Amino acid sequence: MRDGAETDGTEPGGSAAPAPLTERGARTRERLLAAAREVFEERGFLDTRVAHITRHAKVAYGSFYTYFPSKEAVFLEVADRLFEDMTRHVLVPSAGPSPTERIRHANRAYYEAYLRNARMMAIIEQVATFNEEFQEMRRKHRAALVGRSARAIGRWQRAGLVAADLDPELAARALAAMVDHSLYLWLVQGDDPAGTERLLDTLDALYIRALGLPPAPARNADGAHRTGR
Amino acid sequence: MRDGAETDGTEPGGSAAPAPLTERGARTRERLLAAAREVFEERGFLDTRVAHITRHAKVAYGSFYTYFPSKEAVFLEVADRLFEDMTRHVLVPSAGPSPTERIRHANRAYYEAYLRNARMMAIIEQVATFNEEFQEMRRKHRAALVGRSARAIGRWQRAGLVAADLDPELAARALAAMVDHSLYLWLVQGDDPAGTERLLDTLDALYIRALGLPPAPARNADGAHRTGR
Amino acid sequence: MRDGAETDGTEPGGSAAPAPLTERGARTRERLLAAAREVFEERGFLDTRVAHITRHAKVAYGSFYTYFPSKEAVFLEVADRLFEDMTRHVLVPSAGPSPTERIRHANRAYYEAYLRNARMMAIIEQVATFNEEFQEMRRKHRAALVGRSARAIGRWQRAGLVAADLDPELAARALAAMVDHSLYLWLVQGDDPAGTERLLDTLDALYIRALGLPPAPARNADGAHRTGR
Amino acid sequence: MRDGAETDGTEPGGSAAPAPLTERGARTRERLLAAAREVFEERGFLDTRVAHITRHAKVAYGSFYTYFPSKEAVFLEVADRLFEDMTRHVLVPSAGPSPTERIRHANRAYYEAYLRNARMMAIIEQVATFNEEFQEMRRKHRAALVGRSARAIGRWQRAGLVAADLDPELAARALAAMVDHSLYLWLVQGDDPAGTERLLDTLDALYIRALGLPPAPARNADGAHRTGR
DNA sequence: CATGAATGAGCCTTCATTCAT
DNA sequence: GATGAATGAAGGCTCATTCAT
């Protein structure tokens, strides 16, 4: 990851700007990406000027276009990395003991990833409202996450744990929408309803019961899962 | 013109431009509002030019500013009317027979209102990502809808119909987020998963079971509630 | 002057708008003139909108153009009346006892007229910087005032009271400029140097001595001329 | 470009646009300033469009805003340079032989500076009628000039050369107003009374006598100071 | 005459992108 | 590669004046 392997041409969007060849170029590019993320978080996509990014990165104005063909392009790459992070952390621990435990764990992991990236999630929402290319990218990421849940639900149905009349795909989508949008309203829009734990517990409970799984006997009583805020 | 009934001063936001005093003025204003809605739906807020609106309304450029102080202002008013519509249609039928029936009915009503206003809902989402005043407006409308559900859940809990361990407010929020965002992804983003009925049935089922209500015995089997698309 | 005789077509500027024929029309016109003066004083010429004037006069927007062909036109008429006032009050008491007394009296009169019209004098200065027609008007009024002083100086020279080497016309101009601009800087620009009396006394003293007249023996010692502020 | 000498940060007003960093940038900026002065002189502040300036400077429209945040800003800088010029040339020769000589010299110097900058002085007068920031700037420059005269008058009073009953500050203000406004009416407004020499001689004579100084014995009789027009 | 709506040319400013050095 | 200046299309808003009722 240090050797420049990350610029192997897999970045999204049109590759109008060639991958930098020199060590120095790679560093400048990285500086711009980091600065872009910070500025986007600070001001949103619409209110970010290319000049803000270059100033923040302590790089000349013109250098920006050496590495990115447009403002959209940097954003796409910043967002791509973020989705990477979200997916990696959320998906990793897939083999849990019981469905209930796994749901609870997944929700926690998603919450933590969301919290870590809350500002950017807001901006991503913003860009998704007017950039088609970007909507597509989001759709893919969502599909990956939802597909996983859908498959789990299917498995649980076959094991007799989840109500058989539910469409696994549709249920997974709806429940993901619930979790995702609840976190959005809470962490991004600041619709502050209550403490972290109570919100997460509510989401868990609704999620679990909606599927017809047995409500967890005693949650958090021992503080084992306490996440705090 | 003598009765002054048309200047009721109920328009939202600071009214920099006074309400029209004549019949003719009121008509022009209405034309502009209608045109604005159509153009916003067509191109989104960001890509809409005031010139588009006036052209569409067959009105001189300057006339726009006779009635609205800015592009934001028309949008706010268009959105306000839309929220009015959403709220009116969704809230009216409050006294249903059983909780299950009422939930199913409410979801249908919300779906239909959403469908009717889908394009604008997308634009509203867009504007909400960068306009604070607008976020506030949305928060209020959401609070009104959610509060209603929360009170119903509380009642059902006291009647022993719904799991007592749920926080009515949080549960109402989360479930509203589920329905709202599912419809958004589906009707606005075009994340088309399946037919209308199956999606709505899934939302109903999840909603009902999440609260611990008895799943409806036989839904839609007779096609009585079929809404189609 | 009450019978509408003032609208006999002698107003300055092009007479695009005909003189009003009815009593009611005359009243409306008068209201507009008064409102115009107040608004001009309040906001200056450039920042005054026709709408401000009509609103202030409680008259319909369109009515303005029934009486005045343009914003410039009202201003010209307002200014004309003001010059009238300045001239009438300053010129009237011409037959004083000694030159020294007459100068002192004239300066006081001018000061009082200026004070009464200070705000408008500022606006007149503003308009004079870009409107040629208006510059011409001002030139005439100035010439009338200065001419009078010049003739007096000539008389005093022939009477051996004033230094003979001065050009009466040039001296009158320069001294008028001194008084006029000092009052402007003080009353309009707010370059506040000291109390009224001290400024006026200084102007008197400079004026008198500059002409070679004997400095007044004891001024204001008895408070007879005290003008206060 | 390495010495950074051109970024001395001494430009007036809030410098929204940073000083140019390169030689080329400095040249463009200078071109814009020169063009601005010429266009302002030609059309006045109000009738000058940014497009006029850029066209005159043979520079793209947008380049203007690379160097100046607004039309006001260039004007402020043009005016600042002009005041600099006025002050430098007028103030330098402070140690003259006799008060009479010094007054005459100062008036000449002021006249010459005024003549050189007559058109701009008119525009400055224009802007001063509606721009507060600008009024302040003028006040300062005036105060600097007047203060100098006031101190000289005070000295002459203590030396018994000037009437002791005059307030040095007020007298200096009034006499400066006389000279300044006379030159304004003559050179700017074109109130052409007579030849240059006669006007200046009159100003000198009035100035000198007003202070009670002995009228110069033989002025200009030999044409030594003839300035012409 | 009174009223107030309708008109549209005009102007400043922004800012992504391109270029010269 | 790096730098920062150059470009110019685009768009929101103003407001004096004209018109229809």
Image (cartoon, coloured by chain):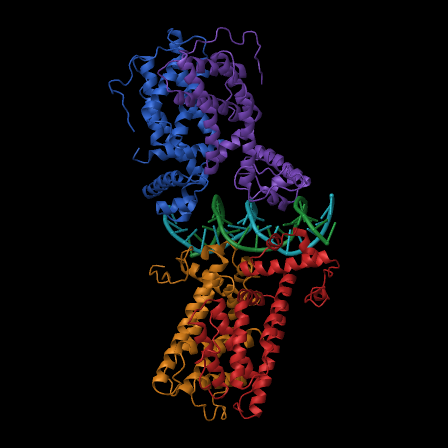
Chain colours: A red, B orange, C blue, D purple, E cyan, F green
Number of marks in the image?
Answer: 0
In front here: C160 or A101?
Answer: A101
Task: Name the image quarter holding residue D213.
Answer: top left
On the question of residue C16 being in view, the answer is no
Task: Name the residue at 54% across, 33% down.
Answer: D79
Task: Name the image quarter holding residue A142.
Answer: bottom right
In front here: A91 or C142?
Answer: A91
> Could you say where residue C117 lies in the image, as x and y percent from the top left?
36, 32
Above-or-below relation of A148 to B27: below
In front here: D192 or F21?
Answer: D192
For the view shown, which residue lies furthest in the right direction?
A21
Q: Is residue C102 left or right of residue A173?
A: left
> Could you say where residue A202 lies in the image, as x and y percent from the top left?
45, 79
Q: Is residue D157 left or right of residue D194?
A: left
Task: Name the residue at 42% across, 73% down.
Answer: B87
Task: Name the residue at 42% across, 26% down.
Answer: C181
On the question of residue D138 being in view, the answer is yes
In front here: D3 or C189?
Answer: D3
Above-or-below relation of A25 to A163: above
Above-or-below relation of C209 to B69: above
- Image quarter hosting the N terminus of chain A: bottom right
Q: Is residue A54 left or right of residue C173?
A: right
Task: Name the image quarter holding residue C159.
Answer: top left
> Could you say where residue D37 lies in the image, as x and y percent from the top left?
59, 34
> Could you say where residue B184 lies in the image, as x and y percent from the top left?
53, 74
